[in-house]
Amino acid sequence: MMISTRQALASATADFATVSETPRLDAELLMAQAMGTTREDLLLRRLDDPAPPAFQALLARRLTHEPIAYITGTRAFWTIDLAVGPGALVPRADSETLIEAALEHFGATGPATILDLGTGPGTLLLAALDQWPGATGLGVDCSAEALTMAADNARRLGLADRAVAQAGDWFQPGDWVAAINRRFDLVLANPPYIGTGELLPPEVQAHEPAGALFAGADGLDAYRVIIPALPRLLEPGGIAVIEIGHTQADAVTALAGAVGLAARMAYDLGGRPRAIILS
């Protein structure tokens, strides 16, 4: 018996209630993927169409807690859509706080040069380059899969002539700052900041790369390396905007103060400290 898209969405929403905080949205995104259309087109014109057979396979994947972005292969961030997949952290809306903070500081003119440490699929770097057409930038990551995604996203978005992806890992021995060998007006970073003993939702713990999530027992190991390097990475008058866990403001501020950097906070839409701005 044929069921409509509307009926299939209602059933999937009920099924997703135990695995997602946004069950209806998840169902709609996967249905649009199965139908080869947009969510907007689905909701406006296609709800009474027959539900496509491909939807059941996507539903089954989501019920294993696989992230929606990995199933659809894309995630919207700031003003761009990024292709994403296993091996790179899924872009999150909280990270848009970093772009907002940089925009508040630089205005429409923007920075001339940008460094994105731990670029993943190019999330922060490509969003910043799309915001400021006169800027160029470098994205650094230790994951070969992530660097491939970042380079592919740059090409797809028409930003390849202004974006370079480079392998690098601040947790490895050697002078990674010397390997970069440049200074930048804006340094962006969403480093790993989860403590190794902390529990995460199954879709994060089981599917997203641990190296992009965990940073020592207290979650501060990446900051202990990145922050002391900033004086060698920043142009005079430049700033770094670095994402933090919402309980880490005091600890990361102390690390900045120890190397003579001034710090202020940027807050996410929930009013929580989400980024530290260093100069």
Image: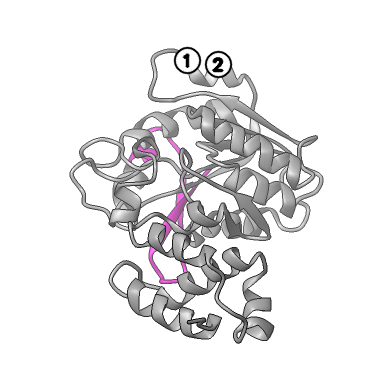
**Is mark 1 in CB contact (under 8 Å) with mark 2?**
yes
Q: Nearer the viewer, residue 109 or 114?
A: 114
> Which residue type does callout 1 highlight?
Asp
* Residue 172 location, quadrant: top left
> Which residue type does callout 2 highlight?
Ala
Mark number displayed over residue 175 = 1
Q: Residue at x 24, y 43 (%)?
A: 195
Instruction: Point out the residue furthest to the front here.
Output: 1
Magenta residue check for 267: yes
Secondary structure beneath dot 1 equals loop
Q: Is residue 138 left or right of residue 251?
A: right
Q: Which residue is label 2 attached to? A: 178
* Residue 220 location, quadrant: top left
Up-down: is 183 above or below 245? Answer: above
Q: Residue at x 62, y 82 (%)?
A: 49
Q: How many numbered callouts?
A: 2
Magenta residue check for 198: no
Secondary structure beneath dot 2 equals helix
Q: Which residues are magenta?
A: 255-279
Q: Nearer the viewer, residue 54 or 115?
A: 54
Q: Residue at x 48, y 82 (%)?
A: 1
